[in-house]
Image (cartoon, rainbow, N blue to C red):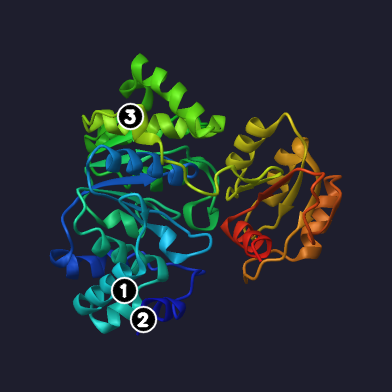
Amino acid sequence: MILKEYLSKKPLFYEKIDYTRMPRIYDKIKLYLPVVKIIHIVGTNGKGTTGRFLASALHSTGFSTGHYTSPHILEFNERIWLNGENADYALLENSHVELQKILEVSDSDALSYFEYTTLLAMIAFKECDYVVLEAGLGGEFDATAVFPKCLSIVTPIAYDHEAFLGSSIEAIATTKLNAIQNNAILGIQKYDEVYDIARKMGKEKSLNIYMVNELINDIDKAKVDIISKNLSLAPYLIQNLFLSISALNFLKIKYEIADFDNARLFGRLTKIADNIIVDVGHNTLAASSIVDSLSEDKYIIIYNSYKDKNYKEILEILKPIILHVEIIEIDDERVELIEQLQSTLIDLGIKNNIFTEIKPEYKYLVFGSFSVVEAFLREYNE
């Protein structure tokens, strides 16, 4: 069965997750998997861009590098980036065949979409020197956490996926930080509790946990100023760039400004037309970062949300830059009822209607999730 057909039979979302499954199956097949240097990225926001900055620089400095990120927006191979481009589908099919040979049928069937894709990526990355591996929604129980790592990178931690991770910053931070095996770099955090838990965990487990600023010098800061201008980075993305550079410094890898020339990841305040910006952010921290970046203008927000997202608070944060909201329909069982979303918008005093077309005289921000951006791009590109 070809990869696309095989994955189509696996659900993308689970009400409950069996956290024992991936470690159990990994233990059975780990001797067949490649041994590469893995840099694991956990956190709530900025994992994708931090990973792409780092992977692009590693590749540019001469290392064969893979970057595993999720979810994808339009095409599955966006998840598996290899040496400067999304993986070729022929490589992914060959990796699928190879993975099927080493998995027992019952285990292959039992693996979730994300778990299977994670193992598939590792097969595809078997010739790599470095693999930048981005966690899905968790930390210690995430499918990506089973592999030995040379370094963990912790991006800002905030509220998200509370049904799986817990309802407090302490609970969310604990499960994410528990993924650290030995060395870690902690990015700048919004909540002091994250620092407290990291310090405590570092002492109890004898971990080497560095603050990002400990690994950044004045030369790095000067380079970041130039790189950020070259890439037209939004302010919140600059912090992700610093985090990736701190990882290079930890690994003692010298870099130049030009090593980041191709480091942009699509869907992070990406301008696709003079009046259209798309962003896959979908939580309160992402909303706050966007308001900081776009505060000088007003936008029509093309939006939708899953039921489990705190969309009332997200919309309240976005309100200072909103002209009005246009709800785009997305095909997903988790999506909130349009009537419920409209009721919330009315309560917030935000005018709204259903999205039908782009008008050239207005500025638009497409925001809400990967699914929102995907739905918009499919309609916009027709």
Amino acid type, callout 2? Ile
What x and y, as percent, mark residue 55?
33, 44
Residue visible at 42% across and 81% down?
5
Name the residue that disc number 3 marks.
246
Name the residue that disc number 2 marks.
2
> Pointer 3: residues within 10 angstroms few (<14), some, or many (20+)?
many
Q: In this rendered view, identify the residue nearer to me: 321 or 95.
A: 95
Q: CA distance from mark 3 to mark 2?
A: 40 Å
Q: Which quadrant: the N terminus?
A: bottom left
* Residue 44 tag number: none
Residue 192 in sight from this viewpoint:
no
What x and y, as percent, mark residue 51?
38, 44
Disc 2 is placed on an element classified as loop
Q: How many marks?
A: 3
Amino acid type, callout 1? Glu
Sequence-first disc among 3 and 1: 1
Q: Is residue 249 above or below residue 281?
A: above
Name the residue that disc number 1 marks.
93
Disc 1 is placed on an element classified as helix
Q: Is residue 375 above or below residue 46?
A: below
Q: Is residue 109 left or right of residue 205?
A: right
Sequence-first disc among 3 and 2: 2
Sequence-first disc among 1 and 2: 2
Residue visible at 23% across and 80% down?
104
Q: CA distance from mark 3 to mark 1?
A: 35 Å
Q: Quadrant of residue 361?
A: top right
Disc 3 is placed on an element classified as helix
Q: CA distance from mark 1 to mark 2?
A: 7 Å
